Image: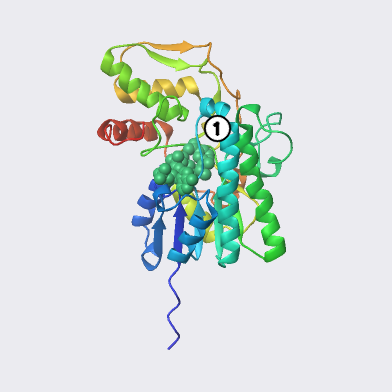
């Protein structure tokens, strides 16, 4: 009889974050995953900024595949204030992971970029080929440059060592287990938290900026399903944008109104236009994804927001905030 093939060990860095938790949920319901060993790491399992700690993780788990989500992440205001830390921590983590994948013979590495790292001055919609066409927006320079290097190095590792390293590019992600911190977090979780407090205190809900910028949002479980698909089926080294279509772009103001509705908030929504808006839009094309998966159905944003609002209220004590 043929020898049983060794079981794949799929290690997810950043396994306790917004995207990592969604992958855990998706994998629990996935038949193929039953024959695999999935390991979800948090920063408590080792600081990936540290090379020795990273090596110890590889020695311990002997991963055959890696989904690399761990990153220093944050919203616009936090990015603007901490550019050096955003660059250094992400650069070091990514370098440690890539180099250990090479040394330990990992069969496939999927890393996570972001649509916010694309050139500031560009034409829309942006697609995968435009990633390095010009400087990123100044507000998140540190984060963007560190993330762009992942794509460069994926190609270098492939050409020089034959490594199967690739990357995916999500638009704004939201869902349960998000970081709901109002100062440091992203727009949807921040607004969900604000709305929760405004409702409780009977105050106005204050939105930072004009509410006019347009964004595409992907529900964390959609991104999780698509990430597992990238790991199993996507063979290119070049990145792939994982996003809802251009027709599903919404304004921040639309999102705020959906959050008020989902929260049962009946007070006033006011705009603090003294606060920065960030990029007006960064519409991404999901044509490449659609060529591979023409029929994939994304969760409608009103439903995803409803679920996120309910999760936050039900998990208020434990939620990151
Ligand atoms: P979260 O902030 O929710 O989670 C970050 C994860 O990384 C946590 O599990 C955290 O561990 C881990 N981590 C952070 N620093 C370290 C470290 N030094 N060593 C080891 N682990 C560390 O992130 P998301 O789930 O939102 O993001 C996942 C990926 O998706 C990231 O690469 C991000 O850049 C990308 N992305 C996210 C978007 C979004 O809108 N959220 C948009 C586009 C891309 P612990 O829980 O222990 O702190």
Q: Which one is nearer the viewer's eye here, 136 or 283?
A: 136
Image quarter where the C terminus lies is top left
The residue that appears at 69% across and 55% down in the rendered structure is: 155
Q: Out of 28 and 111, give the one closest to the viewer.
A: 111
Q: Is residue 135 visible?
A: yes
Rendered position, 60 above or below 146: below
* Residue position for label 1: 247
The N terminus, quarter of image = bottom left
> Which x, y percent locates residue 135?
71, 33
Q: Residue furthest front?
A: 52
Q: Is residue 240 above or below residue 52?
A: above
In the rendered structure, the answer to whether residue 254 lies left or right of residue 164 reads left
The residue depicted at 69 percent of the width and 34 percent of the height is 119
**In this picture, residue 208 sits left or right of residue 115:** left
Residue drawn at (42%, 80%) of the image: 4
Tell me the crowding category of disc 1: few under 14, some 14 to 19, or many 20 or more residues within 10 angstroms, Cα based: few
């Amino acid at each position: 009889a043929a020898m049983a093939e060794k079981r794949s060990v799929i290690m997810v860095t950043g396994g306790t974050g917004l995207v990592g938790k969604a992958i855990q949920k998706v994998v629990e319901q996935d038949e193929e995953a039953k024959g695999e060993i999935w390991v979800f790491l948090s920063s408590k399992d080792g600081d990936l900024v540290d090379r020795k700690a990273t090596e110890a993780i590889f020695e311990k788990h002997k991963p055959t595949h890696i989904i690399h989500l761990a990153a220093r992440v944050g919203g616009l205001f936090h990015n603007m204030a901490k550019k050096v830390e955003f660059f250094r921590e992400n650069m070091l983590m990514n370098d440690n992971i890539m180099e250990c994948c090479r040394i330990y013979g990992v069969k496939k590495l999927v890393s996570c970029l972001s649509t916010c790292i694309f050139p500031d001055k560009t034409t829309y919609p942006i697609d995968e080929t435009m990633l390095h066409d010009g400087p990123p927006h100044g507000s998140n320079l540190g984060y963007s440059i560190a993330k762009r290097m992942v794509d460069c190095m994926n190609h270098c590792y492939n050409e020089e060592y034959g490594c199967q390293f690739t990357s995916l590019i999500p638009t704004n992600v939201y869902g349960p287990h998000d970081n709901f911190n109002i100062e440091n977090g992203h727009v949807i979780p921040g607004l969900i938290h604000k709305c929760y407090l405004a409702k409780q205190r009977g105050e106005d809900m204050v939105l930072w900026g004009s509410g006019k910028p347009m964004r595409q949002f992907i529900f964390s479980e959609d991104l999780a399903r698509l990430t597992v698909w990238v790991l199993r089926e996507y063979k290119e080294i070049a990145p792939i944008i994982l996003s809802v279509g251009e027709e599903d772009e919404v304004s921040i103001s639309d999102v705020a109104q959906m959050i008020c509705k989902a929260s049962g908030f009946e007070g006033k929504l006011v705009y603090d236009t003294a606060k920065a808006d960030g990029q007006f839009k960064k519409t991404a094309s999901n044509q490449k994804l659609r060529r591979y998966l023409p029929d994939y159905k994304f969760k409608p944003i009103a439903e995803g927001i409803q679920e996120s609002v309910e999760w936050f209220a039900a998990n208020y004590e434990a939620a990151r905030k």
